[in-house]
Amino acid sequence: MDNNHVVLETKNLNVFYGNFLAIKDVNFQVFRNQITAIIGPSGCGKSTLLRSFNRMNELVPSARSEGKILFNGEDIYDPTIDPVEVRRKIGMVFQKPNPFPKSIYENIAWGLKINGFRGSKSEMDDLVEQALRGAALWDEVKDKLDQSGLSLSGGQQQRLCIARAIAIKPEVILMDEPASALDPIATLKIEDLMRELKENYTIVIVTHNMQEAARVSDYTAMMMLTGEGERSGTVIEFDRTNIIFTRPKDKRTEDYITGRFG
Amino acid sequence: MSTLTALRDVTFERNLSLRKLKGKLFEIIAFFAILLGIAMLLTLLIDVFLDGLPWISTKLITEFPSRFPDKAGLRSALQGSVWLMVLTAVMAIPIGVGAGIYLEEFAPQNRITRFIEINVANLAGVPSIIYGLLGLGLFVRQLGLGRTLIAGAMTMALLVLPIIIVTTREAIRAVPQSIRQAALALGATDWEVSRDHVLVYSAPAIMTGIILAMSRAIGETAPLITIGALTYIAFDPKGPFDIFTVLPIQIFNWVSLPNPDFHGLAAAGIIILLAVLLSMNALAIWLRNRLQIRW
């Protein structure tokens, strides 16, 4: 693996909810301009891991973490680092589309405004268009930018959320099962979009759907419950996606992806 | 096999007509319950309108109270009610909404917060006369404000604060967590999330709560009688430090007089008070239906 382009790296990461160790001793890397999938059974800590990358997990009052997450070599859990700064550079797309109940235009423009964009109206218009084009949504909404984001279909709403995330030019986009609430056609659109987006962004995606992981990702991290009583999740195997899906080293990975799990 | 056989042995008494009859009976009882409620309300309204309508005139609004029923009006009481509502709103809205926002968005989740929350909810159920006694002791006597509008408004503000805090919190809680997360994930600060999203989307529901709280303040009588607003006022209140009277107190005043003409005046006053209250409630419902976001 090419270590020159490591964007995110976890080092002995443990995440607790209260006294409960949710994920333990996670070590893996995310490479620049690649799509990294995190797969595994329900409740193994995939979302917890993903949400640790932009410090969204600490919004859960009892959450606490140990170890390091290096973002371009810098520990994002260092006490001097403000989570607001982290989230500005590491964007997120959620499982259920969650556009703001504002106009389509405002959905994109708000992120730019709060992050200090002070350009003219026409510059703002350009950035909004750029973001919507980047999310393959422009042609569908260009004539109704003043309509509510909630008026769009589920798939369009999710692409609006992607447009909103890329508008502020993050380095990494975290996606938490972005297609799980969508129909198959909308899902394919999101997957096509991800392949385009990786030209400019680094993507980490959590998915339940192994076919989806196999279709879109370059690297795959396999998570599984381990430890005492099998209650804490960890990454049991991490490799190129084609290797994980053809010749996994861990028997548990093989069982899971061939459907023999559980 | 054995369980299947056992099932087959059970005999059912399917007396469908009796079961349906029970349902019908319940429906009839429920119908009479609602009929009774509506009949009571209608009787009340018809009685008030029969007594009061002959006394409805512009004089009712333009004249001060008087010993002579033909010359008596609600002028000072109406102005007192408006003054009281405005002053109450000025004090109660910022404090109530602010407290609601703090409790919902910023307060740490610990025992002290929970203790405060429970007590705010309990305060909403305290009888209004208790607030009147507090107002009398604290604002009228201790702070030396006398029986003035400001003392009355401070008492009313205390009375409606819990209502405003509770409705604000409910309005804020109705904004989905996913919206907060979406905004935070874009690198927003807590304040930016509250300012541009949570408060904007909960504003219609908060407004509704405020209007309902204000209509409560307009209709309340007991605490104001306690602080001593039961007086004869024959001048326009000029400011917060004037003594005052309000609509329900003037009505109470007229009802207690022996001359039956004053009872007609009181009924007319009730019609006006009802009109004010119902239009405020209608405004609240309209706001809620019109502006509320359906997630």
Image (tube, rainbow, N blue to C red):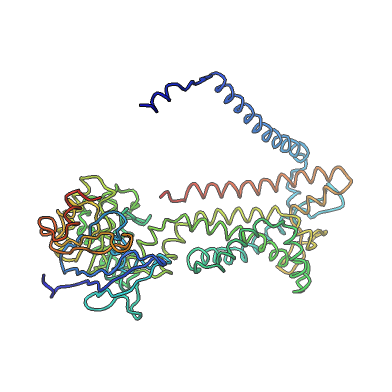
Q: How far across and how far down the image is residue A60, in percent?
A: 40, 64
- Depth order, front residue of B265/A205: A205
Vertical comparison of B105 with A214: above or below: below
Residue placed furthest toward the right: B258
Q: Quadrant of the N terminus of chain A?
A: bottom left
Residue placed furthest toward the bottom: A80
Q: How far across and how far down the image is residue B107, in percent?
A: 51, 68
Q: How far across and how far down the image is residue B273, in percent?
A: 70, 48
Number of on-image labels? 0
Q: How far across and how far down the image is residue B134, in percent?
A: 74, 65
- Depth order, front residue of A86/B151: A86
- Depth order, front residue of B35/B83: B35
Figure quadrant of residue B193 = bottom left
Residue at image point 23% right, 67% down: A172
Vertical comparison of B222 with A238: above or below: above
Left or right, B103 with respect to A201, comes to right
Left or right, A251 with respect to B46, comes to left
Residue at image point 35% right, 61% down: B182
Left or right, A165 with respect to B82, comes to left
Left or right, A247 with respect to B233, comes to left
Figure quadrant of residue B3 = top left
